[in-house]
Image (tube, helix red, strand yellow):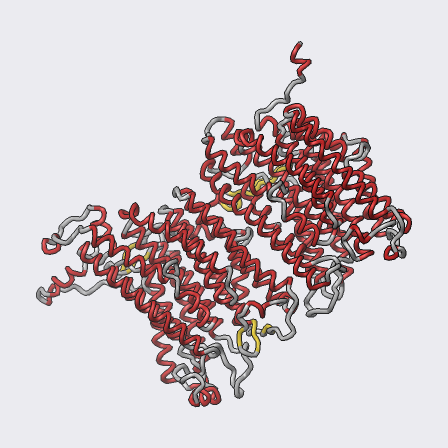
Amino acid sequence: MSAPAVHSLWTTAADPISKIDAPKIEYGQLSPTLIVIGAAVVGVLVEAFVPRRSRYYVQVFVSVVALAAAFAAVVALAAGGYGTTRAHIAAMGAVAVDGPALFLQGTILLAALLGVFTFAERRLDPEAHGNRVDSFAAQAASVPGSDSEKAAVRAGFTTTEVFPLLLFAVGGMLIFPAANDLLTLFVALEVFSLPLYLLCAVARRKRLMSQEAAVKYFLLGAFASAFTLFGIALLYGYAGSVSYARIAQVVDGSVQNVDPALAGTMGNDALLLVGAALTVMGLLFKVGAVPFHMWTPDVYQGAPTPVTGFMAAATKVAAFGALLRLLYVVLPGLRWDWRPVMWAVAVVTMLGGAIVAITQTDIKRLLAYSSIAHAGFILAGVIATSAEGISSVLFYLGAYSFVTIGAFAVVTLVRDAGGEATHLSKWAGLGRRSPLVAAVFAVFLLAFAGIPLTSGFAGKFAVFKAAAQGGAGALVVVGVIASAVAAFFYIRVIVLMFFSEPRPEGPTVAVPSPLTMTAIAVGVAVTVVLGVAPQYFLDLAGQASVFVR
Amino acid sequence: MSFPLLTATAALPALGAVATAAVPAARRTAAKWLALLVSLATLVLAALVAVRFEPGGDRYQLTESHAWIKDFGVRYELGVDGIGVALIALTALLIPFIVLAGWHDADPQETGSKRWRPTQGFFALILAVEAMVILSFEATDVFLFYIFFEAMLIPMYFLIGGFGDRAHEHGEETASTQRSYAAVKFLLYNLAGGLIMLAAVIGLYVVAGSFSLQEIAEARANGSLQMAATTERWLFLGFFFAFAVKAPLWPLHTWLPNAMGEATAPVAVLITAVVDKVGTFAMLRFCLGLFPEASKWATPVILVLALVSIVYGALLAVGQRDIKRLVAYASISHFGFIVMGIFAMTSQGQSGATLYMVNHGISTAALMLVAGFLISRRGSRLIADYGGVQKVAPVLAGTFLIGGLATLSLPGLAPFVSEFLVLVGTFARYPVIGIIATVGIVLAALYTLVLYQRTMTGPVRPEVSRMPDLRARELAVVAPLIALLILLGVFPKPLTDIVNPAVEHTMSDVQQKDPQPEVEAAK
């Protein structure tokens, strides 16, 4: 099925009205996204019309139901064969409904569901003025330390806007890996980025740091978006279309019916190379690959921890999905050009993330650098340029997002008088005080380190195997060296927790509500199951590893 | 379907570990008895494996095979050859003694959280290590082996870092720092080795398309699998590096003295007598079995490294002031003998190496555990802090002497048989290396006897004058080990009968025949 290019829409628009056909939108196939965005809109209305007292409950209910329903829709679509035999391009060429899209949407939705659980946690901090509080500022608009902030705290306000913001972000993330033209890609990028910038700024404690993180994220993110947009413009200039299929055809040189008006600029390789580089750059920024990773540690550290966990998991999934589709659907004809570059990026990302993480003293920054190193490992799978490459990346993303959400959920539990005790020195001897929490965190760290019998190992093995089969053996060697380096700092945290003497003024472990407990328990369960019996999920990822063109 | 005996042998300690870990904090003693019972039951199963194994039968017996991770080409494939049987028996045999010797090593010193259960953890971790070690001896799928080879590091790491000698000459603070240093060093060395191996494992899959030892051997035999020499060498190096770290071979040995010095004596025995054997075992099964050409290619270098290990380890053992580190360096020397026997590529050398693994396990366990009892009485690991113990605690001193004599391979004790075989096997092919290696024996006599002389003989030092002799529990640990040393020393036949056919298979893997004596050739 050939999709009409945007310019042809404009030209037909100049024709008489009678010639315009109603756009054909496959609502059923887009239902996961539609449900989530619809619920986000409902969430905004809830903010406006529901009394403050019951807003929290209504918002949590709406979010959970929407995400669960959207996940059910994804499962139904997959069961209906849309991931394999009936995969096609919906919404007039804008959105692909295929295996990778559905797999990643399912992963994002589950991650978001666990994210909502951690967002909704209200038992960790002591009650303020008789009101239960969560991780978010009483009133995001009030200046830190001001009278209005104190008043808001006294009044027991809570920032329930975070739930619709989360849903909007999820809506964008669902479209991002499914986008099948560059404009949809860009719109999805903005739709999920803007709510995340906001979410980063609303931490209850350490508000200045949180706001700093948001500003940094926003500024750098805006730059990255601008680059992407510029790249999109150049690619349009190159191919005369923003549609993935069309650009791919032009790259392959198999294009027919060239518009004479565009033939002059079309096929200019300079436009293609620069455009592709800039577009990919924007995606690498979202992925957190070196050298576009600078924002990661600051943002991970400053953002409220539930947001960090959600963002670290879901953004990575969405961005890698989009990157895969761009490289495999739009630019396969260019792979002799982008593979060496991605090689270099993967190598510096793996080594850079792992080496810099060694010197970190804050657990959230440590996990941020670890996420950079993991981005490098995933890139190794991307470079494979094979069906195994796709399925290994899909599997890795699924495994990684559950470990990440679980790990950050544990971070929210370890607290002292100033809120979360994220400095590593405060984690000393945690294993003696709270063996269970420390053991759970150790499981997550071992999974990050890729120790066998955890999901991290299965994922790492999958991507390295794909890379080796794709002829990137040297990359695998760099990967295992980076893993060895990375193991050092994961182990260091375990040493600290189990072998160091507890400090007398050390932090305590808050007893969470069933919400956070669920998030952590699911994280552990998935980590172990994917480590011991990954076959079913590998099958799933394998079946989902064909992009529709 | 027959009873999955091999799975059961590993599953029992694994389940035992879970059960032990779940014992409530107050019921410490129950956890200890549970762990002991489980380890004894495992010994029964291991004995059953040895009985059911037919030395003259197929190469791999009691096999089990199930699909596991299809996408990775991984099968849950178990099977034992004679070498595996011997080492499983050794493991299952030593664990009850380790549990019994460590009876009080993990009693909580101060009351932490109510949930802090160090005792339960200690014994659960030991059983977990046992399960993984047994599985790695049984796995005939490279990937499956790799998983347990790597995963066993984690419980081992907690055993080294989490539990140390009660008394320490530098105070608890320093002891704790040194312990975690030793644990981290252990883990990083072995993890790095394992990750290098991971690259080679992936490479093997890319080249061979399978992880199954039998499939790869068949493919090689019918010619459908042909490795380029360079590829084979790189893959061999990846595997060998990991095993050389684990074994440990000079110059990758430096983690062992730290780990054995800081860990409690039973854990030190677990490291050197049980876990490290996986390294030498894997050299036989995987390096020689998968990469015969590359093994032959690398033999000269490896023999030299082994020789350096033998002499260097022994020399450093002579110079040690710390009893446990002395035993550690002695072990490095002995591992040199084992590796030398494996790569001498003669059937005597390899039989000797396999026997050596078993005998070294028993003799080191005897020596180290008695040393541990000694250290726990005086609260010091320094040789200089002892003197005249044999007058105060004659039984302790006597058993220590026998353990020491076994370490220096006195004829009549088990290690003599294996060391002799290794030397004969090496001499047949590499006479110069065989001759130099005998220096190791002389040095062994030096460090053991000097150790005995300084600690046990001479005037009784005031600090040891009230030292109690071995208690019943301690005697129950030492006496059977010494009995075994003597038994296998005068009657090694049951062991050699099991081991020899397996060694012939390995020899045929590398297509080597024993060099014929020259006199015979002249006829």
Name of the residue lying farthest toward the top: B523
Foreground residue, B109 or B39?
A: B109
Q: Is residue B227 visible?
A: yes
In the displayed structure, A412 sits above or below A449; it is below
**Side of B522 where B322 appears, left or right:** right
How far across and down, in percent of the image, does residue B91 sit? Answer: 71, 44
**Side of A133 where A91 appears, left or right:** left
Foreground residue, A162 or B513?
A: B513
Q: Is residue A399 visible?
A: no
Name of the residue lying farthest toward the left: A16
**Side of B390 where B351 appears, left or right:** left
Name of the residue lying farthest toward the right: B391
Identify which residue is drawn at 71% across, 35% down: B440
Total number of numbered discs in the rendering = 0
How far across and down, in percent of the image, does residue A158 sit? Answer: 45, 82
In the displayed structure, A530 sits above or below B340; it is below
How far across and down, in percent of the image, does residue A326 sit? Answer: 30, 55
How far across and down, in percent of the image, does residue B107 sit? Answer: 76, 61
In the displayed structure, A116 sits above or below A273; it is below
Identify which residue is drawn at 35% across, 63% down: A174
